[in-house]
Amino acid sequence: MESLEDDNNNVGVANKEYFLPGPATDLNIRKSLIEQHSPPDILVHNLVTGSDVDKLFEIFYKHVNPFISLLDPVLHTPESTFARCPFLFTVICAVSSRYYTEKSEIYPIAMHFAKHSAANALIEGWKSVELCQAYILMSIYSVPARRWEEDRSWLYTGLAVRIATDLNLHQVSTVQPQCEREEREILNRTRVWMICFNLDRSTATQFGKPSSVKEDYILRNSKEWYKKSQYNIKDDLHLCAYSSLLRIVGRFHDDIFSDLNTPSGLNKQIDFRSVTLTHDAHLSRYFEEWSKKFAEESDRNDRGANFRCTLLPFLVDYSRLVMFSFGFQHAFTRGIEASDHVFFSKCFDAAKSVIKHMIDVLAPSGYMRYAPDGHFVFVSFASAFLLKMLRPEIRQLLLSQELETEIFDLIARLIHTLSSSEVAIDDRHTPKLYARFLAGLLAKHRKDGAAVVGRLQPLPPQSQTMHRSSASDFQGHGTASSSSGSAFNAPQSYSSTTQDHADDGDYSQMAQTSSKAPTPIYRPEIAFTPGQGQIDFGISSDLAMMDGVINGFSDEEMLATMQAIKNPTWWQNMMMPGFSWPDASAMSPGIDTYNQNIPGAHQGFSGFQTASVAT
């Protein structure tokens, strides 16, 4: 008989308990373990109070969750989220703090705690659905990176996918739920797997990486999943719609990249016109079908649901722009013929529609202040593509003076929109940074570009700017001072929507258990330094791109996604950012070396979507 000592020495599959459920699968035991060993640093160091937590979760469900459909508000209350996964609790509070006007200064510190928790959870955390959700949220709402090598969005996505696969979320549950809680848990698992697919497919396309999640039974039958149960959340309708869109785009890429004998896989022998028009027809049918579903089945009394409906044409038009850009580039390479006008007109109309939809529909909704960065990447890439259409070869053949003027004026309107208080929270918010970047591009491409922007009425200055707390308050060891001057005390008034939350409870004592824990060293984020004031539209076009400075800010301040547009090679073809036609790399060894640092520069993917738009 095997001794107890021998059993304890056995590790891995040699341990007879290796495949048995661990203590963390019991929510009551997990709650106790968290209370004793791992309360969130964001509470331990008094960065937020109980009242703050309530408001931060309210902000999340009202303004953030509509973009991503990630959490069921019945399952994930502040108390239950704390008891299930301190990492997810921290990330929700950190992301929401960006929009918490009462304590806007805590955002960079809170995100620092979230990143620290992400590292610890990878090493020490229990694998759970909530852990997967936390990495998904970190991928979509991560701090903007200045360089590709600093960007962690793709890595967070990969972690989420691996954890989801390890938890068998890709398998259809055979459990028959006995109560509402169990049914919601099953729906929660499927929802997370669908989001993993969306996030993986969209991020892979954006960054030029191979996708990890293949279409399986759940995805192939996801079209009607949103009405599988009476406990589906209202945003599941839009989640299913986005999955369907990504499947269409995925099939297009499968047809385009079907040459197994080339490094990129791009098949230059296909009939680009025929293939693209075929998939464009799929897009048109998709748009008609889901527009009807939205009109009939979306909750018209819910502002978030209404906003998600308005995203449909924005996403479809961007997808269409990406599709036709391949044919445009093929025609541009061999020499434009009369039959190629369809590529120009489709690209022009799609890019223009993306920009106009942002200006006239999305921005006035008020929701774009809370949008993931991907939406601003979309519209900025579309704007840069229009500017690229002004190159002499295209202008002489296809562009009239009226269309050229329309491009300049449209981008000028977009610049004002992205820098307005309707969209930008402060001068370091992503849309404001893109507005400054586009202003530099506009000034570079037209001598009176600054005047074009200047003709529009300047917007009033932001009433709120980001003020950073003293970094010294969060460095070293010990407990930081809270804004209220007292230790965290969670209110006793939390109520649960369902009656069987075994993992709910007061978490104030948990937060105080490890009050002596060392504080992770806070390192300032450049994206959240004090604002730079109004955009200077008066910059000389001759200085717009001089010495690495674009409209008043340097390479150090540029976001990583801007580097794809700045890449000189990209301006030599008609592809979207993130993709370079295979022949382009042979133009210059210097350019080829530069491209090694740009994701997707040598892969066969175009910039369809970013990690910021997961659903």
Image (cartoon, rainbow, N blue to C red):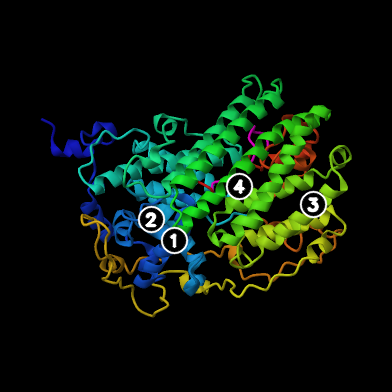
Mark drawn on residue 406:
3
Is mark 2 in CB contact (under 8 Å) with mark 4? no
Q: Which residues are magenta?
A: 601-612
Image marks 3 and 4: residues in contact by CB distance under 8 Å: no
1 or 2: tag closer to the N-terminus? 1
Say which of marks 2 and 4 sits in front: 4
Name the quadrant of the N terminus. Answer: top left
Q: Are marks 2 and 3 in contact (CB under 8 Å)?
A: no
Residue 336: give x, y in percent of width and height: 83, 30
Q: Which mark is first along the chain, 4 or 1?
A: 1
Q: Nearer the viewer, residue 542 or 521?
A: 542
The Cα–Cα distance between marks 2 and 3, rounded to whole angstroms, is 48 Å
> Label 3 sits on what residue type?
Glu
SS at circle 3: helix
Q: Main secondary structure of the magenta part?
A: loop
Query: SS for tag 2?
Result: helix
Identify the residue under disc 2.
87
